[in-house]
Image: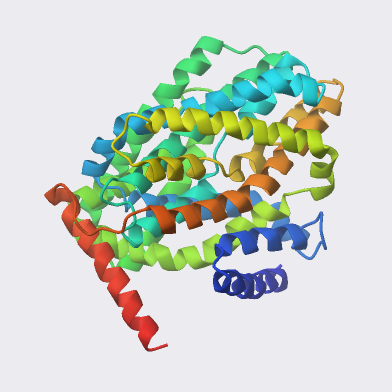
Amino acid sequence: MALSLAKIIICSLIIDWLFRKIKCPGLIGILLLGIIFGSYGLNWINPDLLSISGDLRMIALIVILLRAGFQLSKATLNRVGKTALKLSFIPATFEATAIFLFAPYFLNLSPMESAILGFIIAAVSPAVVVPLMIRFMEEGKGVEKGIPTLVLAGASLDDIYAITIFNVLIGIYTGHKVNIIRKLSGIPLSIILGIGIGLLTGFFLYTLFERFNPRATKRVILLLGISILLVQLEHYLRDIIPFAALLAVISIGVIILERREKMAHEISMKLSKIWVFAEIILFVMVGAKVNVPVALKAGLSGIFLIVLALVFRSFGTYLCVANSHLSLKEKLFVVISYLPKATVQAAIGAVPLNAMKLSGMNTQPGEIILAMAVLSILLTAPLGALGISIAGDKWLKTSYQTFNDNECSQVIYHKEKIEMSQTSKQYE
């Protein structure tokens, strides 16, 4: 397993460098490398490593969500809150509705099977979106209007909404008793509890750090450990009381940033170093889950359906920001940022097929759903990441002036990072 991991790291660093040389996001190359190295490609990844890929992907996702939390100021969140709330469910609903309406004609699925497929595909990928939004924050792009924060907040809630509806539908389809009202009411409850638990945890950690003043490295290790425990706690309490653990992870950073920015920035810098390794693990393991032969079974009909659904999704996204203070190009940037799929589709794409097997049902619809989930990753993850990167660099304004004092020091911090980066490049 160690040898396999070494090959992945070395090849990923080379691929990342090559893609950046041609002005493409490095994560695209790493994702494609995972597809090639995975069990459906050259099968060069050790089976023992693949067996723990779920845990590795989760830890890597926690790292990037922690980084996101340490970039989100309370003042900016207050500014974009209403729009972010709309982005949390309207685009996903538009996309899922399109698949529900058209999948019976394109893929010969039943209305219920089409609805299940719709909410699998409707979830935006935090693994693709969050790293790019953090990069724009660090470069000061769109910071003045809080655009990266808007996308981060909306995308985090989007997944909760899509996965909850999916669980309701799959339970009904396989004949299990599902309390629909309880499940649906659990969406706002899980969001509120997730944010609340995260803020309390963040306040506890802030108090602990102030009292004992450990080194930044030890702070990061403790943060990672507690974040992993929160994710596991969500699984244990799933049938008792719902709470969104990933929202809790993000909220930890928000409260520490609000209380003491210098501490937050020190932790964020440490996390950015860990992310170099975590990014490789996350995207290689996501890519390794992609079964290209299965995706090809969906054919041209599947491709056309995904494109059609993305058109519906884009219209829904634009409606959310239509009356905002953003310019036309900035609104289009938000639309593009809501296109990539990867993490959720890789995690739950095979769930309907497994449920149908266990229930003794016809598994052909499950195979089609899995094929479409994989195809959505292949189509939208690389193109979406490239689109976000290009649109962000061209359309987002780089600015170091904000509307309030609370955000001022954070933007100055971003400016200092950019200047240091530019200085280091001069000596390379």
Q: Number of labelled discs?
A: 0
Q: Residue furthest bottom?
A: 427
| Left or right of 366, for residue 412 | left
At 40% from the left and 45% from the top, the residue drawn is 329
| Left or right of 382, for residue 36 | right
Q: Residue furthest front?
A: 328
Residue 225 is at least partly visible in this image: no
Residue 349 is at least partly visible in this image: yes
Q: Quadrant of residue 427?
A: bottom left
Give the x, y percent position of residue 254: 29, 46
Query: Which quadrant is home to the C terminus?
Result: bottom left
At 43% from the left and 27% from the top, the residue drawn is 319
At 65% from the left and 58% from the top, the residue drawn is 31
Query: Which quadrant is home to the N terminus?
Result: bottom right
Image height check: is 92 above or below 329?
above
Colour scheme of the rendered structure: rainbow
Give the x, y percent position of residue 194: 39, 34
**Closer to the camera in the image, 224 or 126:** 126
| Left or right of 93, for residue 34 | right
Image height check: is 336 above or below 241?
below
Give the x, y percent position of residue 214: 27, 65
**Closer to the camera in the image, 278 or 394:** 394
Give the x, y percent position of residue 216: 31, 66
Q: Quadrant of residue 97?
A: top right
